[in-house]
Each structure stands twice: as structure tokens, then as C-alpha cells.
Image (tube, rainbow, N blue to C red):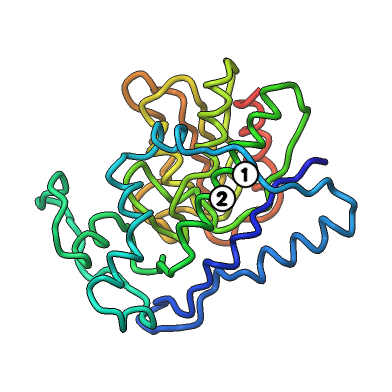
Amino acid sequence: MITFFSDLHEGHAPANEFYRGELVPCFEKPARAHYVLDELKARGHDLRFPAADSRAVLERIHTLRYLRFVESAWSQWIALDPANANVQPFPSAWPVRGLRSDVEPENFVAKLGLYSMDNGTPLVEGTWRAVKQSADAAFNAAQLVAGGERGVFCATRPPGHHAGADFMGGYCFLNNAAVAAQTLRDNGCERVAILDVDFHHGNGTQEIFYERNDVLFVSIHGDPRTEYPFYLGHADEQGGGAGEDFNLNLPLAAGTASARWFDALEVACDRVT
């Protein structure tokens, strides 16, 4: 199987993240991709680097000011103090209910909070290059599928499904699944669906397509009442406006047995087909 991967992912290797109030070694690290790539090589997959640029598609699913921030965030951080090259920036303030998010602050940490849903998604010098190439991989894969290829796999990091139109979170900066879906739509594919089976709900993907009726989003995940991302992923979220009935969430409570998960998968597949 043709498989796209990012050789620039190693540039995104944060040292630490916050977890339960402590600064701990980052869980999302290059080794995760290496394990997968080693197995893909052993199985003889056709490994490729992405060649085509996804920028135009990115500007259709993410806001321009958000893209500009992620692309320039590290240089902005270093411009404050060259010593910041050895320090990971973390947000410490967020525009919660009642506060404004339409005006971009000049303060860097405030901007970081504006564009973040948590403080567990650290930026480093190589972040933009890594996330951009991951998005390029999704773009190239979707182009091949739109051109008739039966199936294409992407083995990329950082991940993407928590990233919304104008925010990062959950280790995610650019939404690769949304890039693939939008690329398929742009190439004339009429029935496009995203089936998300990650343990955590793909809140960013849902947010991007929630009011659209040209991309179906279906997710099986841990109940957001107890599991990240907490504030999205409930069963009553079925799409809004033109996107009504184009969003299906299948949250599962803690302790759910495998049989119940497979029941949910059957429901999800029936909805997709």
C-alpha cells in the first residue's frame, strides 16, 4: 500500500508537557512514529514523502490568522528574548465565556492562549515544519484516492483531530483528517466521510465540519463527561444548520466491554455506508 510519511516530524520533539499539574516528559514524541514506520517497512509498504503543497486547502479549513500564528509562533517567541530558545512556551490565560476572542492580543502568551484549548500542546522550533509536512501527506494521499487509488495510508505526526479551525490542542496543530476530506471534496468526490476511532473525541474535526452537509463525521470515543476533550463529543451533537444529521457521536462509558465497542463500530459503519 502507498504510505505517506513525514521525515520532518523529528523536528517536533518537545521535552515536556503539563500533566496533572506537573511538568513531565512529553508523551507525544518521535519514537511513536518510528515504531509504526519500522513495521511498515518490514511489511513492504510503498513509503513516500509528500510532494504537493497543502497550503491552499489549509486556508479553507483553518483561519488565516491562526495559520499565520502557528507558522510564526516560534520566531515570535525568540524575538522576545533569545534565551527563549531553551524554553518551551505554554499558555497561561484563555478567552473563556464572556471574554473576547475576535481581537488578537499583542502579548505573545495571550496569543498562545487565544489559539490553544489546553496547555499540553507545546511548540518548539521545528513544530511548523513538522505539522505542515503532515498536512501535506494527507493532501497528497487524498489526491491519489480522488484519482482512483483504492486506498492510501498516512503515517504522520503530530496528530491532528483535536485542532479546530482556529485552535490547537491535544498535541494537534493542523487537522490532517480535515485536509484529506476537503481535498476529496475539491476533487469532486460527492460522498466524503470521516470515521474517527481514536479513544478521544475528534473535537477539532467536528468543529470544522459541524455546519456542513458535504462531509459526514462519525466518532467512537470515551465519554467526554470523564475523558478528554471533555467539552465536546456528546451524543446529542448531531450537526448544526446545513450540517444537521451529518455528525454522529458514539460515546462509550468507562469500563465498556469490547462487544459494546464493536456494536458501536457497526452502527458507525452503517451510517457511513
Q: Amino acid at mark 1?
A: Ala
- Residue 100 image offset from top left, x and y in percent: 11, 49
Q: Secondary structure at mark 2?
A: helix
Q: Quadrant of the C terminus?
A: top right
* 254 versus 13 height, above or below: above
Residue 29 pos. (x, y %): 58, 70
Q: Circle 1: is it few (<14), some (14-19), or many (20+) Cα within 10 Å?
A: many
Instruction: Name the residue rendered at 58%, 28% in the picture.
Output: 193
Residue 167, compared with residue 184, is above or below; it is below
Residue appearing at x 62%, y 44% in the figure: 137
The residue depicted at 23 percent of the width and 56 percent of the height is 114
Tag 2–tag 1 contact (CB < 8 Å): yes
Query: Looking at the rendered structure, which numbered label has been put on residue 137?
Result: 1
Of the numbered discs in the image, which one, if any, rests on residue 216? none
| In the rendered image, the vertical position of residue 183 relative to residue 51, given as above or below | above
Q: Quadrant of the N terminus?
A: top right
Q: Residues within 10 Å of mark 2 (few under 14, many from 20)?
A: many
Q: Is residue 47 above or below residue 246?
A: below
The secondary structure type at the circle numbered 1 is helix
Image quarter of residue 241: top left
Examine the image and state in which quarter residue 79 appears: bottom left
Quick check: 162 left or right of 136? left
Foreground residue, 243 or 139? 139
Q: Which residue bears the numbered disc 2? A: 133
The amino acid sitting under disc 2 is Gln
Q: Kindly report the distance in space between the C-alpha atoms of the residues bearing marks 2 and 1.
A: 6 Å
